[in-house]
Image (cartoon, rainbow, N blue to C red):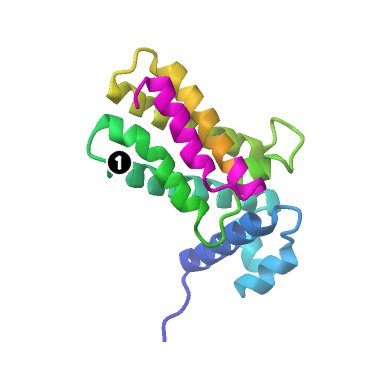
Amino acid sequence: MNEITRNDTQDIILDVAEKLIYKSGIAATGMDLLVKTAGVSRKSIYRYFANKEDLVVAALKRRDERWMQWFSSEVDKAPTPLARLLNLFPVLKGWFQSDGFRGCAFINTSGETGDPQDPVRQVAKLHKQKLLDYVTHLCTEQGVEQPEVLGKQLLVLIDGAITLALVMGDHDAADQAQDVLKTLLAIE
């Protein structure tokens, strides 16, 4: 019989924390619910994480890595720099239509914190910076005149589309954001 290793236990805790936080938010994700859902003891959680905030931050960092890897690998499947830029929005639309879509975990959790210096907000800021860096890189690859400017505009379009998809249930927001990008790039 295989024993659960320490890393396996930590992974289970992080997986469950990430899912619960994404589904219901930080405040609704209490330690009792984490213990029950993960099937581990409270002592096991505190062996790896000093407190709930440390666990939330670790779960969000993990989500950032996984989401950015998924997003960039899907977008990068397009064959040309222009196609990759335009592919941002079909990839998002596919995510919007997926089971369990609840918007951006980083925007959602940031809304639960009031302090800009809160570690959760700092993880969210880091995630948005990585996303901005990625789309700016795509703009540079395409050879746009001001890649940093277009990169920031794309971040607004991406986050706006995510918000409309969540709040309004408008999955076509991704198509509309792509139309705006086409206008910005002066293409049909």
Q: Amino acid at mark 1?
A: Asp
Instruction: Give the percent coordinates (x, y) of residue 119.
Output: 65, 38
* Residue 170 located left or right of residue 113: left
* Residue 122 located left or right of residue 136: right
The residues colored magenta run 163-188
Up/down of 29 relative to 130, above or below: below
Residue ranking furthest to the front? 188
Instruction: Give the percent coordinates (x, y) of residue 66.
Output: 44, 50
Looking at the image, which residue is at 67% across and 70% down?
A: 35
- In the rendered image, is residue 70 in sight? yes
Dominant SS in magenta:
helix
Looking at the image, which residue is at 55% across and 39% down?
A: 161
Instruction: Give the percent coordinates (x, y) of residue 109.
Output: 67, 45
Instruction: Give the percent coordinates (x, y) of residue 93.
Output: 47, 48
The front one of 67 and 57 is 67
The front one of 118 and 155 is 155
Looking at the image, which residue is at 74% across and 68% down?
A: 32
* Residue corresponding to mark 1: 76
